[in-house]
Image: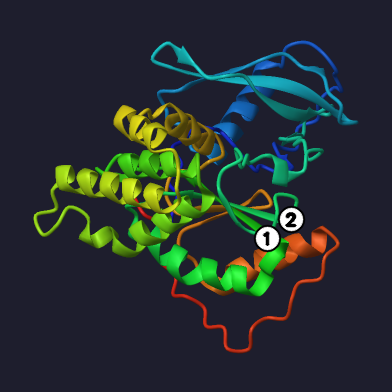
């Protein structure tokens, strides 16, 4: 899967330490750059980041930085009267080297960055050493593929070492996915078993939803019927389930979508294994590798790989 990055959309550069030239400069720790130095800085930034010619580049004064031997300069890009946020570069005090330095906070456990929201779960307990959160679309064929092939293998191999939670990420181009998310959640609010029974069935029969004519109305009707029937089997409170399904409140689902987007999710399936993201219906061996790494980091010993395990073929994420 290729990712297109538009110039200056994020301006995440990896310039490293790049020589601007061999001209001697007087060391400085504050004040505006000389026109000559400012021009060389601008030319380098334009060339390394493919800045379009219609963008103006404004370079600020030197300020003190936390990196010995380097001052900070602020660079702002302007086009059509719209300015970017200031981006900080490092300029050596002799004026010969430009660099960019990024700091990232790794003090938080990545496992805690993706909330399970106390959703229905499979596998081990909530405090299992590995927590797998999947952002799932019940109309997505690649989600169904992963659900049917990978998750049974994971729960069989790792048992109580993994805690699996699904969160909803219905895509706009899937017309009945939002209703499926709401209906299954209505059942899941009263019965975890009922939720997973529905998810299993819907993922296994998604191609049949809507009948031969692929009617959205028929698909929605079928989802409601499946949910009522499963609720009855699980002896849930019928009035509460009926009210929930009738209301079709998408507030929680939309909040989940926003949270997922903030985590960089834009397609399904998307897995977070103790906070490490993997997208698409990938081979099982990749998932095993990530889970094993998470177990080792948690001080656990991964179980032996099944001798007959066959990796699932790779597939592109749903879109």
Tell me, yes or no, whether the two marked residues, 1 and 2, touch with CB atoms within 8 Å: yes
First in residue order: circle 1 vs circle 2:
2
Residue 158 drawn at (x, y percent)? 68, 69
Does any portion of residue 197 appear in the rendered image? yes
Q: Quadrant of the N terminus?
A: bottom left
Residue drawn at point x = 49 percent, y = 36 percent:
261
User: Is 116 left, or right, of 245 in this rendering?
Assistant: right
Residue 33's image quarter? top right
Residue of label 1: 162
Residue 290 drawn at (x, y percent)? 66, 64
On screen, 191 above or below 72?
Answer: below
Residue 129's image quarter? bottom right
Residue 144 drawn at (x, y percent)? 39, 62
Residue 24 drawn at (x, y percent)? 81, 30
Label 1 sits on a secondary structure element that is strand
Residue of label 2: 128
Residue drawn at point x = 78 percent, y = 10 percent:
31
Furthest residue to the bottom?
307
User: Is 195 left, or right, of 113 in this rendering?
Assistant: left
Furthest residue to the left?
213
Q: Considering depth in this image, is 279 or 117 the residue closer to the camera?
A: 117
On screen, 225 above or below 295?
Answer: above
């Amino acid at each position: 899967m290729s990712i297109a990055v538009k110039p200056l959309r994020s301006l995440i550069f990896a310039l490293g330490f790049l020589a601007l030239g061999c001209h001697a400069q007087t060391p400085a720790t504050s004040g505006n750059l000389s026109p000559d130095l400012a021009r060389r800085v601008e030319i380098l930034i334009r060339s390394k980041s493919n800045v379009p010619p219609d963008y103006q580049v404004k370079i600020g004064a030197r300020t003190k930085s936390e990196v010995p031997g380097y001052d900070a300069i602020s660079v702002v890009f302007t086009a059509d009267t719209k300015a970017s946020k200031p981006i900080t570069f490092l300029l050596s005090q002799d004026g010969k080297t430009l660099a960019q330095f990024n700091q990232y906070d790794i003090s938080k456990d990545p496992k805690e960055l993706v909330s399970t929201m106390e959703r229905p779960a499979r596998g081990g307990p909530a405090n299992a050493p590995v927590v797998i959160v999947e952002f799932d679309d019940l109309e997505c064929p690649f989600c169904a593929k992963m659900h049917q092939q990978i998750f049974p293998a994971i729960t069989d191999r790792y048992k109580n070492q993994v805690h699996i939670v699904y969160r909803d990420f219905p895509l706009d181009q899937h017309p009945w996915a939002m209703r499926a998310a709401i209906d299954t959640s209505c059942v899941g609010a009263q019965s975890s078993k009922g939720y997973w029974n529905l998810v299993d069935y819907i993922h296994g029969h998604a191609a049949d939803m809507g009948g031969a004519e692929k009617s959205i109305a028929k698909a929605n009707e079928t989802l409601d019927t499946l949910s009522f029937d499963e609720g009855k089997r699980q002896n849930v409170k019928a009035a509460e389930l009926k009210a929930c399904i009738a209301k079709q409140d998408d507030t929680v689902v939309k909040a989940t979508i926003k949270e997922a987007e903030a985590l960089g999710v834009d397609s399904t399936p998307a897995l977070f294994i103790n906070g490490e993201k993997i997208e698409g219906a990938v081979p099982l061996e990749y998932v095993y590798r990530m889970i094993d790494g998470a177990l080792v980091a948690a001080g656990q010993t991964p179980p032996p790989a099944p001798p007959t395990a066959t990796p699932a073929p790779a597939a592109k994420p749903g879109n």
